[in-house]
Amino acid sequence: MPKRDFLALFSSFSWVLHTQAQYQGFAPFKHDELTYTIRVPESTAHSGDGPLYFQMNTSRPIEWFALGQGAAMHDSRMFVVYTSGDNVTLSPRAGKGHYEPLYDKTLRASLISGTGVHDGTLTANVRCDNCKLSPSRATNLNYAFSPWIWAIKFGASLGTLSLTAKIAEHDAFGVFYVNLTKATGPDNDNPLLNIDRRSITKAWTQPFDHNGFDRKRTAHAVLMTLAFVLFFPLAALTLHLLKSPQTVRIHASIQLFTLAMTVAGFGLGVSMAKDVHILKHHHAIVGFVVVCCLVLFQPLMGLLQHRHFKKSGGKGPFAYFHRWLGRAMIILGVINVGLGFELTGIGSSAVPRGAVIAYGTVAGVLGLMYIVVIVGKAARRGCS
Ligand code: HEM
Ligand SMILES: *[C@@H]1O[C@H](CO)[C@@H](O)[C@H](O)[C@H]1NC(C)=O
Ligand SMILES: *[C@@H]1O[C@H](CO)[C@@H](O)[C@H](O)[C@H]1NC(C)=O
Ligand SMILES: *[C@@H]1O[C@H](CO)[C@@H](O)[C@H](O)[C@H]1NC(C)=O
């Protein structure tokens, strides 16, 4: 085979490998009468800044149809398309509420080649130059579930080229969610020409429950922070600070209660990790190990040592296991709370930098206290 053909074959093979997931598509009527296809160039995904492309197709006659960035009309940027003969108009508009969105000249978007009416299908190929996008992060929910709205008004062509044309309320509308990572492909002057349909993956139509997720995340963070920074270490210290026949009972009760808190927090964590497909993230793995070790060994080892003490009055091997596993898991847990903050995004509105500094300070002070108590007691024992 001539070398050139071989190269061509090779490049077409690698092209096939690369055809996966470069666009996200959505068809509200499932008959391709209306399709929206979204594409993010790699450089835009990387920096969070740059052009974004989308294609809007309809084979049913329309007065207008539109695509918008946002989860509802309010606060969205919309791209409304209508025709006059074979001329296509793109009118970028600002959504303010449940009423007609008006032309917004600050939105920089333009029609690129491929736009027009072909065999009864109206195609608008759009390049948007200031559509906002946060830089890609695997765990950024606005990235994996980027909300887009669509709407359509069926009927005869508006027959105007005016960007400020009056439009009537839609006949159909909805929301879909784009995984922007799956919409990303190589930089290209016009990625909307000759789209290979195999490289279009379906966008989500089930709404992602952002509010529910946020509530779970807050509860998870509160339970885990209280457990690892406050309750586990303080209940461990009761054994050193409290001299009473009830000490062991108090210690065990608080620790079991805290363990229950941890298990509840763990359940919320697993549910969230499933929602956003990050079960293999290091925060999830460390959390899994810590919670499993605590549940499997701590109560059992504590109980076995207690029985040993009742028989012999001394410390058995279980005591050391219980003590050192407990300390190690508290330290790992405290670190893992930090990894959780990092996962959500330190400096974001959910995790302000100040909160992380406060967390670090409290954890540091408590850690120091813990060491002072343990070392102080050992020293006193050494002296006497
Ligand atoms: C003349 C223009 C428009 C009017 C008068 C209008 C009016 C409305 C009204 C009254 C609703 C509430 C419907 C309900 O709850 O049953 C609504 C919802 C909606 N509209 Fe529009 N609309 C207009 C243009 C658009 C455009 C251009 C888009 C898309 C790009 C759009 C997308 C939506 C979506 C996604 C919803 C549901 C989410 C939400 O409540 O915001 N609309 N609209
Ligand atoms: C939209 O229409 C154009 C022109 O008819 C076509 O080339 C393109 O494949 C269509 N896109 C989708 C996603 O069907
Ligand atoms: C289409 O656009 C061209 C150039 O702006 C204009 O001359 C023509 O009249 C338009 N056709 C219709 C049907 O609006
Ligand atoms: C988004 O797409 C990427 C790349 O295909 C994938 O790894 C990730 O799990 C997807 N996220 C969601 C939430 O589906």
Image: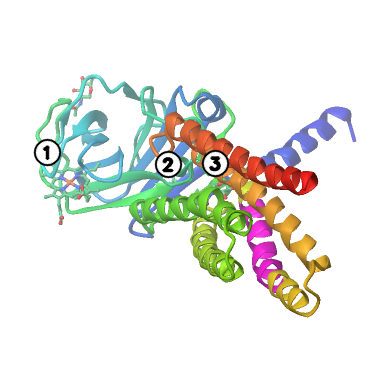
Left or right of 57 on screen, residue 178: right
Give percent across and percent down for residue 86: 26, 32
* Image quarter for ligand 2: top left
> Residue extending furthest right?
1
Please tell me which of labels 1 and 3 falls first in the chain: 1
Give percent across and percent down for residue 249: 57, 71
Residue at the spot 17% in from the left edge and 41% down from the top edge = 157
Between circles 1 and 2, the one closer to the viewer is 2
Mark 3: C-beta under 8 Å from nearest atom of ligand 4: no
Q: Quadrant of residue 256?
A: bottom right
The magenta region covers 284-300
In the rendered image, which quarter contains the N terminus? Answer: top right
State the residue in front, 383 or 240: 383
Residue that label 1 marks: 100
Between circles 1 and 3, the one closer to the viewer is 3
User: Dot 2: few (<14), some (14–19), or many (≥20) neighbours within 10 Å?
Assistant: some
In the rendering, which numbered label is found on residue 142? Answer: 2
Mark 1: C-beta under 8 Å from nearest atom of ligand 1: yes
Residue that label 3 marks: 343
For the residues labelled 1 and 3, say whether their Cβ atoms are less than 8 Å apart. Answer: no
Q: Tell me which amino acid carries mark 1.
A: Glu
